[in-house]
Image: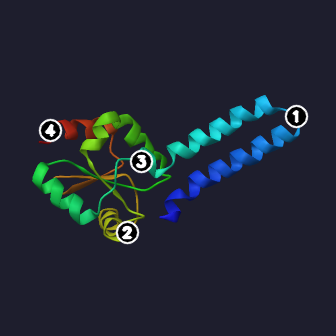
């Protein structure tokens, strides 16, 4: 769990250091902008941006029942963030599996990617798709029950 929050905490720490340096030089107003920028980066890279993650076994079971895609992701992945943002509100319809929290999910991704943990890996109807186009994933979400 701590690994998922490492990057957001580093962003906040860096923003605090930069802001405190600017405040010590007498620029309180100038310190606000970088602090807010680093806080935004921390938020975008945190697990809070993504829908609730479930285990790989549960995601597979639910996907077989409702036909929705399973998205394997990890915090800090810019491609995962891009997919999440481009899916918009539809992202909640997919089943999300954080491979850093679920060893079975990491194993499924490695099996689909020749031993690599390349994410996002989207599984639709039992077939894995590595870093698919967000428009294609939106289309798959529209087709699901």
Query: Which residue, given by chain and number where applicable, does mark 3 sit on?
Result: 80
Cβ atoms under marks 1 and 4 closer than 8 Å: no
2 vs 71: above or below: below
Give the foreground label among 4 and 2. Answer: 4
Q: Secondary structure at mark 1?
A: loop
Instruction: Tell me which label, 4 or 2, sits earlier in the chain.
Output: 2
Query: Which residue, given by chain and number where applicable, does mark 4 sit on?
Result: 143
Q: Nearer the viewer, residue 27 or 138?
A: 27
Q: Which mark is residue 115?
A: 2
- 10 Å neighbourhood of mark 4: few (<14), some, or many (≥20)? few
Place of residue 89 in the rendered image (x, y in percent of width and height, measured from the top left): 31, 35
Instruction: Tell me which label, 2 or 3, sits earlier in the chain.
Output: 3
Cβ atoms under marks 4 and 3 closer than 8 Å: no
Instruction: Determine the image quadrant of residue 54.
Output: bottom left
Place of residue 124 in the rendered image (x, y in percent of width and height, measured from the top left): 20, 51
Q: Secondary structure at mark 3?
A: helix
């Amino acid at each position: 769990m701590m690994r998922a929050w490492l990057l957001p905490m580093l962003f906040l720490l860096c923003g605090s250091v930069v802001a405190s340096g600017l405040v010590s030089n007498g620029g309180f107003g100038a310190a606000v902008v970088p602090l807010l920028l680093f806080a935004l980066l921390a938020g975008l890279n945190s697990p809070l941006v993504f829908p609730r993650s479930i285990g790989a076994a549960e995601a597979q079971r639910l996907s077989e029942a409702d036909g929705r895609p399973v998205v394997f992701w990890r915090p800090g992945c810019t491609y995962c963030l891009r997919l999440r943002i481009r899916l918009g509100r539809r992202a909640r319809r997919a089943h999300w599996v954080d491979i850093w929290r679920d060893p079975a999910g990491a194993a499924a991704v490695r099996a689909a990617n020749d031993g690599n943990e390349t994410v996002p890996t989207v599984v639709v109807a039992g077939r894995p798709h590595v870093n698919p186009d967000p428009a294609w994933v939106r289309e798959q979400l529209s087709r699901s029950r």
